[in-house]
Image (cartoon, rainbow, N blue to C red):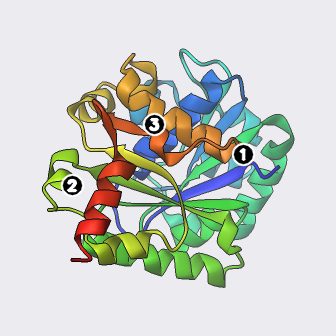
Amino acid sequence: MEKVFVVTSGKGGVGKTTLVANLGCALAKMGDKVCLIDADVGLKNLDVVLGLENRIIYTIIDVVNNRVKPEEALVKHKILKNLHLLPASQIATKEMISPEDMKRIIHQLYPNFDYIIIDSPAGIERGFRNAIAAAEQAIVITTPELPSISDADRVIGLLENAGFEAQSVKLVINRIKPKMVKRGEMLTKEDIAEALAVSIVGLIPDTDEMVVATNKGMPVVLNGNQNVSVIFENIAKRLKGQPIPIEADTIVPGGSFLDMIKKLFKGSRG
């Protein structure tokens, strides 16, 4: 079973790092041994979202330069001891790492983990090529605005050109506002058609809980908010091959995103 995932997008600020952190925590809570790799060299923040910024001794640059082995640079999570982070360096540049370096690092870590999740920098330059080099599957994250969906479509095309099969590319739609969906003010028919070009594995709400958890360095999966954390747990289960229907991603009392999207999709045909 494939176990190396890259989380990527066409633009910044769509929630990649939050997804990586929560997905990693969800898999670790299920008993899997998980390694998260921050490939966003120069703009690192996965360590902050995980609350591990003060525990970093070595970074991925130290591994690339053979100062330490990959396992020596790993930072263990405070609560989930089977969750590890390979942090990025804030004083380095993406050009200091090559796709071959990333392949080597993944190859060395591969036997020791059930899942390896790579947090890709935004855009399609060197950092993107580094991040996808050793990945077996890609998760493209987008928000429900047309520019973001268009960027995601471009990234999907680049992934396919890089050799990813269609079934190896999944989509997560982040920051959907349920009230706007109900009013027909979000996700047009064209947006949905664009999003459904690849398999959707998660629909994430735009909630205050997500913002608060991120600011506290405590992924929402660990802060006790079941309404939101269950979504990341469902995404993790789908990636593990479990047939969890998208309807299970309940967002609001008495409804789900899929119900709202179906209603909007149907209404937009009129």
Kindly identify which residue carries mark 1.
241
Q: Is residue 98 visible?
A: no
C-alpha separation, residue under disc 2 versus residue under disc 1:
29 Å
> Which residue is more in the foreground, 221 or 256?
256
**Residue at coordinates 72% horizontally, 45% vertically from top-left?**
241
Mark 1 surroundings: few (<14), some (14-19) or many (≥20) residues within 10 A: few
At label 3, which amino acid type do we have? Ile
* Residue 213 to residue 231: above or below: above
Q: Quadrant of residue 71?
A: top right
**Residue at coordinates 41% horizontally, 42% vertically from top-left?**
18
Kindly identify which residue carries mark 2.
181
Whether residues under marks 1 and 3 lie with C-beta atoms below 8 angstroms apart, the answer is no
Q: Position of residue 97 (x, y in %)?
A: 62, 64
Q: Quadrant of residue 213?
A: top left
The earlier-in-sequence mark between 2 and 3 is 2
User: Secondary structure under badge 3?
Assistant: helix
At label 2, which amino acid type do we have? Val
Kindly identify which residue carries mark 3.
231
At label 1, which amino acid type do we have? Gly
The answer to whether residue 155 is left or right of residue 109 is: left
The earlier-in-sequence mark between 2 and 1 is 2
Mark 3 surroundings: few (<14), some (14-19) or many (≥20) residues within 10 A: many
